[in-house]
Image (cartoon, rainbow, N blue to C red):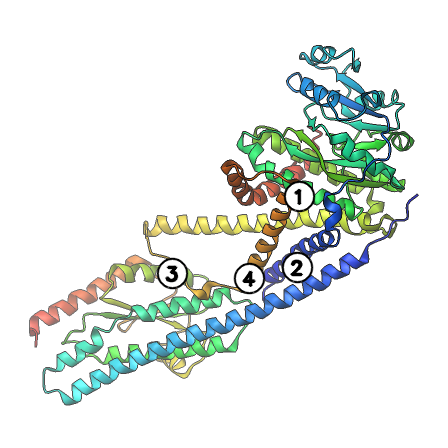
Amino acid sequence: MVERKVEWKYLIAALLVTSVLFVGIFMVGTELSQYKIQDLQSEISNLQIEQQSTVLTYLLAENMETGSRCAAQSILAEQNMDDLYEVRKKLEQHRNSRKIEDPRYRNLKSRYILTLIENYLRRQSLESDCTNQTVEVLYFHRDSCDSCSGQGRVLTDLRHEYSDRLLVYPIDSDYSLEPVRFLEKYYGVQRFPTIVMEGEKFEGYTSRKRLEERLKNLFRSRNSTLNSTGSR
Amino acid sequence: MQLIEWIYLGIFGVMLYSTVLWLIVYLDNREDVHKDPEPSYFPGVTFLVPAYNEEDYIAGTLESLLEQNYPSEKIEIIAINDGSEDNTLEEMKKYEDRIEIIDKENSGKSNSMNQALERVDTEVVACMDADSRPEKDFLKKMVGYLEEDGVKGVTPAMMIEDPETTAQRVVWFEYVYNLFLRKLFSIFDSQFVMPGPGSLYETKHLKEIGGWDEDTLTEDMEVVFRMMEAGAKIRNSTNAKVKTHSPPDFRGLLRQRSRWYRGNLNNAFRYRNVFLNPKFGNFGMVVIPFNLVWAALVMFIFGHFFYRLSTSLFDMAASIWQYGLQFSMPMISVQSLSLFHLFNVALAALGVFMLYMSISVSEIDLGERARKLDVVFFLIMYAFLYSVFWIKALADKFRGSKAW
């Protein structure tokens, strides 16, 4: 009969090495997080700088140039929204890959939402008889709402089809920022998702057909206004 | 972190631990991995070769045994025709002046070997599958181990003979990997299978414990439990190469593996007293529990992956149906990287290192491009296959199948 022993030395050595590996991987993970946050920070800073320079140029043009009023407005109107959407995607990717909560993410997301709302505000102030052929849509949603992902896809689809003429502002109602609360109160947002398209409110999941119909009506009325008053 | 993420963290931990454990066992015993003890004498060895419908291969097997680089008067061969319906018996008879032949009705591999075992009077007895061919120095490299105190069994280094079909090429690499792993298990005193193609037993010991079990699906695994209970040690040689065959088609492979894993489960249950029993050393405390944990783990990972894959395919189909085909370039950014990617990289790196070690230990020539491709396909397909094997094994078990 052979004495059978458990070779603890191997088991314990392996445990130690595995623990060291674990710690090592977590440390690299922390570095990675740091890098990702910094990447987001710079993206959002750039976004804010872009936004601010566009707005300032517009204000300068409006106040100082004696040229047509509409020329100044076109600076705002022609601002490229792609960056805004790209940063949003990055924020989402960041959140999806996050295993451990980081308060800095919320901070960055908040900054993004504020930039978004400011952009919306500026666009709303553009006068309709100049170049404002774009329709702005406020899209209120939350994490916990079931039909929001479907609604999101509808809006993305519409945005791709009507690219320059439709702008979607996704407002993440999980963030209790004052401007967000203000907008929710102003439009009486109670259910999610809620879409506000140029003053008209759509509560709950709204089909592409319905949204597109309203959109087309708005485009038609815009065109007729422009045509009747002529370009300036 | 959600529950599923904690589970994955645990899974990563287990996988890391097992790989690290084997690497440490290897590093601490590097010199022993390649060396076989020189035998101080050559004991008599009887080879038992049970065969059922193996007319294509039996001659090759018998030739290899007769050509062993070993004193010929010390080798005896008993070929057992297990009621074959083809020309196996005729093929055997070609060698009848040099081997003993038992012709009997079909009663299964274990019974065939047990009947032959009664006639064995040499010090050592070996089993040899009828489709397997040992290399010339096979026996010489293995017998030395039996001189060590307490060693009652020795296992060989199995490889696949000429893999041609995909089903064979996918597992070819698994055999290479197991060649290395088996040695580590042997060093860790916890081998759990005595493979049919070429395992050696001390005859006295095998007869004492009652030969092979005739009811189990996997007699090569079941016998180990009884050997362990009798306190036997089992060693391995990485140089005693024997070439065996693997099923040429996936159905056959699936059937084979289902049998293996069902056998594994049955034996683990039957000998559950071994489970976490310190009397059985590393075998009972580490390896047997680990086998079960590993199987459950792989099934979970595959199951979860399949679930995620099918839900995303479903979503994709639903969205194409509703919105038509949209090709938007998926944005790839550093933001998608997560802690789990890091774990995957660490595991992959360790895995590749283990693979590299097993290639160098088995001393195979990877010069052929085909072999390199086999490695790639092995890596891609194996995890998937392994889970399918286990799922089929469990499914068969629930259906009460006793199929071979």
Closer-to-camera residue (B102/B373): B373
Q: Can residue A111 be spotted in the picture?
A: yes
Label 1 or label 3, whichever comes before in sequence order = 3
Circle 1 residue: B361
Q: Give the residue type that dot 2 points to.
A: Gly
Q: Foreground mark, 4 or 3?
A: 4
SS assignment at label 1 = helix
Q: Quadrant of residue A231?
A: bottom left
Relative to A48, say whether B79 is above or below: above
Circle 2 residue: B13
SS assignment at label 2 = helix
The structure residue drawn at horizontal position 49% and vertical position 78%, both measured from the top left corner, is A104
Q: Cβ–Cβ below 8 Å for labels 1 and 3?
A: no
Relative to B144, say whether A101 is above or below: below
Quadrant (top left/top right/bottom left/bottom right) for the C terminus of chain A: bottom left
Disc 2 chain ID: B
Whole-angstrom CA distance, mark 2 to mark 1, is 27 Å
Q: Give the residue type that dot 1 points to.
A: Val
The structure residue drawn at horizontal position 41% and vertical position 50%, both measured from the top left corner, is B316
Residue B137 in the image: x percent, y percent? 73, 30
Q: Quadrant of residue B224?
A: top right
Q: Kindly identify which numbered label has been placed on residue B331.
A: 3
Mark 4 neighbour class, 10 Å CA radius: few under 14, some 14 to 19, many 20 or more: some
SS assignment at label 4 = helix
Whole-angstrom CA distance, mark 4 to mark 1, is 29 Å
Label 2 or label 1, whichever comes before in sequence order = 2
Circle 4 residue: B342
Label 4 or label 1, whichever comes before in sequence order = 4
Q: Cβ–Cβ below 8 Å for labels 2 and 4?
A: no
